[in-house]
């Protein structure tokens, strides 16, 4: 099962990294997708005031997608609590929650 806070390599239309942001309850259902925020290398960061640093990577909460579970090929990292709190904060700003 995919878990909230994991960073996965995702194939599909284009290969990318994604931080799982959907809940573990949602991820455990038969729904064939998972909601992720794109993760890019720090050197590829474009101007984004909501970007969240994570080691040599940056989480982009304004780049959300819902790839198919079958496209998740490898778990490459797990975000710590502070990173997930900052991502949650950015998502709330984007959605005016």
Image: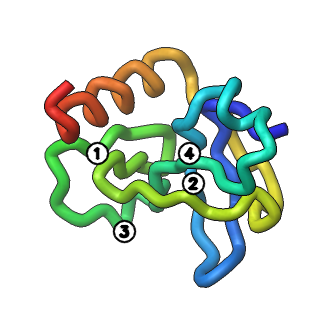
Q: Which residue is mark 2?
A: 18
Marks 2 and 1, how far apart in space? Answer: 14 Å
Image quadrant occupied by the N terminus: top right
Residue 20 image point, x, y percent: 59, 42
Label 2 near label 4: C-beta < 8 Å?
yes
Q: Which residue is mark 3?
A: 44
Mark 1, Cα crowd under 10 Å, few <14 / some 14-19 / many 20+, is: many
What kind of element bears circle 2?
strand
- Sequence-wise first label, 3 or 1: 3
Marks 4 and 2, how far apart in space? Answer: 4 Å
Marks 4 and 3, how far apart in space? Answer: 16 Å
The image quadrant of residue 5 is: top right
- Sequence-wise first label, 4 or 3: 4
Mark 4, Cα crowd under 10 Å, few <14 / some 14-19 / many 20+, is: many
- Sequence-wise first label, 3 or 2: 2
Foreground residue among 15 and 47: 15
Between tags 3 and 1, which lies in front? 1
The image quadrant of residue 6 is: top right
Q: Which residue is mark 1?
A: 51
Residue 19: assigned label? 4
């Amino acid at each position: 099962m995919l878990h909230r806070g994991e960073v996965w390599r995702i194939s599909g239309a284009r290969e990318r990294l994604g931080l799982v942001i959907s809940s573990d309850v949602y991820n455990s259902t038969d729904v064939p997708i998972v909601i992720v925020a794109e993760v890019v290398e720090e050197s590829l960061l474009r101007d984004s005031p909501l970007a969240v640093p994570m080691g040599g990577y940056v989480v982009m909460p304004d780049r959300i997608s819902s790839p198919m579970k079958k496209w998740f090929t490898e778990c490459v990292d797990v975000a710590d609590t502070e990173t997930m709190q900052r991502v949650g904060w950015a998502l709330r700003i984007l959605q005016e929650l």
